[in-house]
Image (cartoon, rainbow, N blue to C red):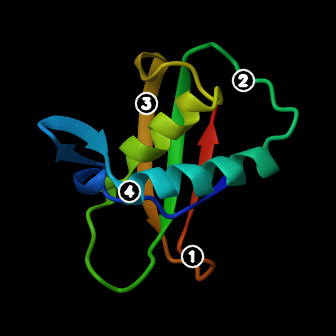
Amino acid sequence: MIHLPFPPTTNSLTGVHNGRKIKSKRYRAWEEEAGWALGKTLRGYVASKSPYHLEITLVRPDKRPRDVNNYDKAISDLLVTHGITPDDSQMQSLTVRWSDAQDGPTVKVRAG
Protein backbone atom coordinates (compact mmCIF):
# COMPACT_ATOMS: atom_id res chain seq x y z
CA MET A 1 0.00 0.00 0.00
CA ILE A 2 1.36 3.40 -1.02
CA HIS A 3 0.23 6.60 0.72
CA LEU A 4 0.36 9.79 -1.32
CA PRO A 5 -0.76 13.39 -0.87
CA PHE A 6 -4.10 14.23 -2.45
CA PRO A 7 -3.54 14.92 -6.18
CA PRO A 8 -4.70 17.83 -8.30
CA THR A 9 -7.74 17.21 -10.47
CA THR A 10 -7.19 16.09 -14.05
CA ASN A 11 -8.63 19.42 -15.18
CA SER A 12 -5.74 21.32 -13.55
CA LEU A 13 -2.77 19.21 -14.62
CA THR A 14 -1.78 21.34 -17.59
CA GLY A 15 -1.89 24.88 -18.86
CA VAL A 16 -0.78 26.70 -21.98
CA HIS A 17 2.36 28.85 -22.12
CA ASN A 18 3.51 30.46 -25.36
CA GLY A 19 1.14 28.18 -27.27
CA ARG A 20 2.57 25.01 -25.71
CA LYS A 21 0.86 22.67 -23.28
CA ILE A 22 2.87 22.45 -20.04
CA LYS A 23 2.40 20.97 -16.58
CA SER A 24 0.80 23.40 -14.14
CA LYS A 25 2.76 24.68 -11.13
CA ARG A 26 0.32 22.90 -8.83
CA TYR A 27 0.85 19.60 -10.66
CA ARG A 28 4.65 19.94 -10.60
CA ALA A 29 4.56 20.71 -6.86
CA TRP A 30 2.35 17.67 -6.22
CA GLU A 31 4.66 15.45 -8.34
CA GLU A 32 7.63 16.51 -6.22
CA GLU A 33 5.83 15.97 -2.89
CA ALA A 34 4.35 12.64 -4.04
CA GLY A 35 7.73 11.53 -5.39
CA TRP A 36 9.28 12.08 -1.96
CA ALA A 37 6.43 10.08 -0.39
CA LEU A 38 7.09 7.24 -2.84
CA GLY A 39 10.79 7.28 -2.05
CA LYS A 40 10.12 6.95 1.68
CA THR A 41 7.55 4.20 1.23
CA LEU A 42 9.21 2.08 -1.44
CA ARG A 43 12.89 2.02 -0.57
CA GLY A 44 14.28 -1.15 -2.18
CA TYR A 45 11.03 -1.96 -4.05
CA VAL A 46 11.47 -3.77 -7.37
CA ALA A 47 8.60 -3.12 -9.75
CA SER A 48 7.07 -5.79 -11.93
CA LYS A 49 6.95 -5.22 -15.67
CA SER A 50 3.85 -7.41 -15.96
CA PRO A 51 0.28 -6.30 -16.59
CA TYR A 52 -1.24 -4.91 -13.41
CA HIS A 53 -4.45 -3.83 -11.70
CA LEU A 54 -4.55 -0.44 -9.99
CA GLU A 55 -6.73 0.32 -6.98
CA ILE A 56 -6.93 3.90 -5.73
CA THR A 57 -8.68 4.93 -2.53
CA LEU A 58 -9.12 8.66 -2.04
CA VAL A 59 -9.79 10.43 1.26
CA ARG A 60 -11.67 13.68 0.63
CA PRO A 61 -9.76 16.84 1.56
CA ASP A 62 -13.01 18.63 2.46
CA LYS A 63 -16.80 18.33 2.14
CA ARG A 64 -17.10 19.83 -1.35
CA PRO A 65 -18.58 17.52 -3.99
CA ARG A 66 -15.88 16.04 -6.22
CA ASP A 67 -15.82 13.59 -9.11
CA VAL A 68 -13.98 10.43 -8.09
CA ASN A 69 -12.73 9.90 -11.65
CA ASN A 70 -10.82 13.21 -11.83
CA TYR A 71 -7.78 12.08 -9.86
CA ASP A 72 -6.46 8.82 -11.34
CA LYS A 73 -4.39 10.35 -14.19
CA ALA A 74 -1.87 12.14 -11.97
CA ILE A 75 -1.48 9.07 -9.74
CA SER A 76 -1.09 6.61 -12.61
CA ASP A 77 1.47 8.83 -14.37
CA LEU A 78 3.44 9.24 -11.14
CA LEU A 79 3.66 5.46 -10.66
CA VAL A 80 4.92 5.01 -14.23
CA THR A 81 7.44 7.87 -13.94
CA HIS A 82 8.92 6.35 -10.78
CA GLY A 83 9.01 2.81 -12.17
CA ILE A 84 6.41 1.43 -9.77
CA THR A 85 4.21 0.23 -12.61
CA PRO A 86 4.99 -0.31 -16.27
CA ASP A 87 3.41 1.86 -18.95
CA ASP A 88 -0.32 2.58 -18.57
CA SER A 89 -0.96 0.32 -21.56
CA GLN A 90 -0.19 -2.61 -19.21
CA MET A 91 -3.00 -1.64 -16.79
CA GLN A 92 -5.68 -4.34 -16.88
CA SER A 93 -8.18 -2.63 -14.58
CA LEU A 94 -8.62 0.53 -12.56
CA THR A 95 -10.73 0.98 -9.44
CA VAL A 96 -11.10 4.41 -7.87
CA ARG A 97 -13.20 4.90 -4.74
CA TRP A 98 -13.80 7.32 -1.91
CA SER A 99 -13.04 6.40 1.69
CA ASP A 100 -14.80 7.87 4.70
CA ALA A 101 -11.57 7.64 6.72
CA GLN A 102 -10.57 10.75 8.61
CA ASP A 103 -6.82 10.50 7.95
CA GLY A 104 -6.95 12.62 4.80
CA PRO A 105 -6.59 14.14 2.48
CA THR A 106 -4.54 11.22 1.23
CA VAL A 107 -4.43 8.62 -1.49
CA LYS A 108 -3.88 4.94 -0.88
CA VAL A 109 -2.68 2.99 -3.89
CA ARG A 110 -2.32 -0.73 -4.43
CA ALA A 111 -0.84 -2.01 -7.69
CA GLY A 112 -0.34 -5.62 -8.51
State the CA–CA distance, disc 2 to disc 4. 28 Å
Q: Amino acid at mark 2?
A: Ala
Quadrant position of the C terminus in the picture: top right
Depth check: 69 or 76 in front?
A: 76
Image height of 17 relative to 102, above or below: above
Q: Is residue 42 left or right of residue 33?
A: right
What residue does disc 2 label? 47
Counting residues from the start of the chain, the first of labels 4 and 3 encountered is 4
Q: Amino acid at mark 4?
A: Lys
Image height of 16 relative to 106, above or below: above
Depth check: 7 or 68 in front?
A: 7
What residue does disc 3 label? 93
| Between marks 3 and 1 in the image, the one whose residue lies nearer the viewer | 1
Counting residues from the start of the chain, the first of labels 3 and 1 encountered is 3
Image height of 97 relative to 16, above or below: below
| Between marks 2 and 3 in the image, the one whose residue lies nearer the viewer | 2
| Between marks 4 and 3 in the image, the one whose residue lies nearer the viewer | 4
What residue does disc 4 label? 25
Crowd rating for badge 3 (residues with CA inside 10 Å; few <14, some 14–19, many 20+): few
What residue does disc 1 label? 104
Residue 60 place in picture, x, y as percent: 44, 74
